[in-house]
């Protein structure tokens, strides 16, 4: 086994590896390979921590790191760092390679002075690399209430006492903007994705919860989804919002919220505490600006 810095000649192979590793894991298809493709040109990219793992003269793993920021309660910003995507070829998964690659990378990060890492991931895996819930360090996730314990938001001080020495007792973490490049440039992503062999996208129970990016309806099976102009499934929007490649409602975000509010009784069947229509509308006003159709 060998771990080294990625070289330009590796780029396409590593992007294909990343695509294979993430396909249908967290969502139908994946975007992580495009994030990597674009991130190498991003000023937040850290070339010294752009690492590949080789076994039997083949690249089987990759990880990249990025600069990030913590926002203090007074609005001041402090430097932080994150990593990902981290990818292991499907044939080598669940054999300990991912943990070995990550542990090696974290030690390299510590050596170059990186003191604190935030990331989103599976606690049951990342705890073996020293990560714990970020809420235990009073570090909050940008889309969640400050008093929430977010099970997928993890953190680790690579340098003991780094938070205290930097005057950080409480802060909010926002993922680097570069991680959302596929959502912000959908046509460019589609053109890039078309350069790879076709693979079938599917909704799967093991994925993160998927929601219609127009009305917020949960998407649990392919039949819930809308349809593109060519008859293929559109996994971003539900069948009630999108058909034949276009939206079925010509409306503003506020009009969509008013429309959805009439279904509050159905929503309350899934809620531990019932909401009034106005409470439901208020919740949607916080949620809808993050949906793809309404995101600015």
Image (tube, rainbow, N blue to C red):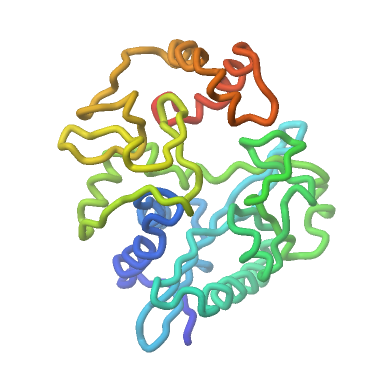
**Identity of the residue drawn at 83% across and 60% down:** 161
**Identity of the residue drawn at 50% across and 17% down:** 263
Q: In which quarter of the image is the C terminus?
A: top left
Residue 79 in picture, x, y percent from top left: 66, 49
**Identity of the residue drawn at 72% across and 36% down:** 76
Q: Is residue 296 visible?
A: no
Residue 66 in picture, x, y percent from top left: 54, 56
Number of on-image labels: 0
Residue 38 in picture, x, y percent from top left: 37, 52
Is 102 situated above or below 215? below
Dividing the picture into quadrants, the one containing residue 181 is: top left
**Identity of the residue drawn at 55% across and 25% down:** 267
On screen, residue 187 versus residue 110, left or right, reads: left
On screen, residue 292 versus residue 138, left or right, reads: left
Q: Can residue 179 be seen in this view?
A: yes
Is 150 situated above or below 231? below
Which is more toward the observer, 192 or 244?
244
């Amino acid at each position: 086994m060998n771990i080294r810095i990625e070289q330009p000649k590796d780029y396409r192979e590593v992007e294909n590896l990343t695509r294979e590793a993430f396909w249908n894991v967290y969502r139908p298809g994946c975007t992580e390979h495009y994030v990597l493709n674009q991130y190498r040109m991003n000023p937040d990219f850290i070339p010294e921590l752009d690492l590949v793992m080789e076994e039997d003269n083949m690249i089987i793993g990759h990880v990249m790191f990025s600069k990030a920021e913590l926002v203090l309660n007074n609005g001041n910003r402090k430097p932080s760092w994150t990593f990902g995507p981290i990818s292991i070829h499907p044939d080598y998964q669940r054999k300990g390679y991912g943990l070995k690659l990550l542990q090696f990378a974290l030690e390299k990060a510590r050596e170059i002075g990186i003191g604190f890492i935030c990331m989103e991931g599976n606690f049951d895996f990342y705890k073996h690399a020293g990560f714990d819930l970020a809420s235990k360090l009073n570090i909050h996730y940008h889309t969640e209430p400050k008093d929430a314990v977010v099970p997928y938001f993890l953190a680790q001080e690579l340098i003991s006492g780094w938070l205290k020495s930097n005057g950080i007792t409480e802060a909010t973490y926002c993922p680097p903007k570069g991680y959302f490049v596929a959502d912000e440039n959908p046509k460019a992503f589609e053109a890039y994705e078309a350069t790879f062999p076709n693979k079938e996208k599917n909704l799967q129970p093991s994925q993160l919860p998927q929601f219609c990016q127009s009305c917020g309806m949960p998407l649990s099976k392919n039949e819930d989804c809308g349809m593109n102009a060519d008859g293929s499934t559109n996994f971003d929007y539900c069948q009630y919002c999108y058909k034949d490649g276009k939206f079925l409602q010509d409306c503003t975000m506020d009009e969509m919220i008013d429309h959805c509010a009439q279904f509050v009784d159905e929503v309350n069947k899934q809620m531990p505490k019932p909401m009034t229509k106005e409470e439901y509308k208020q919740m949607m006003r916080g949620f809808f600006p993050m949906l793809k159709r309404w995101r600015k």
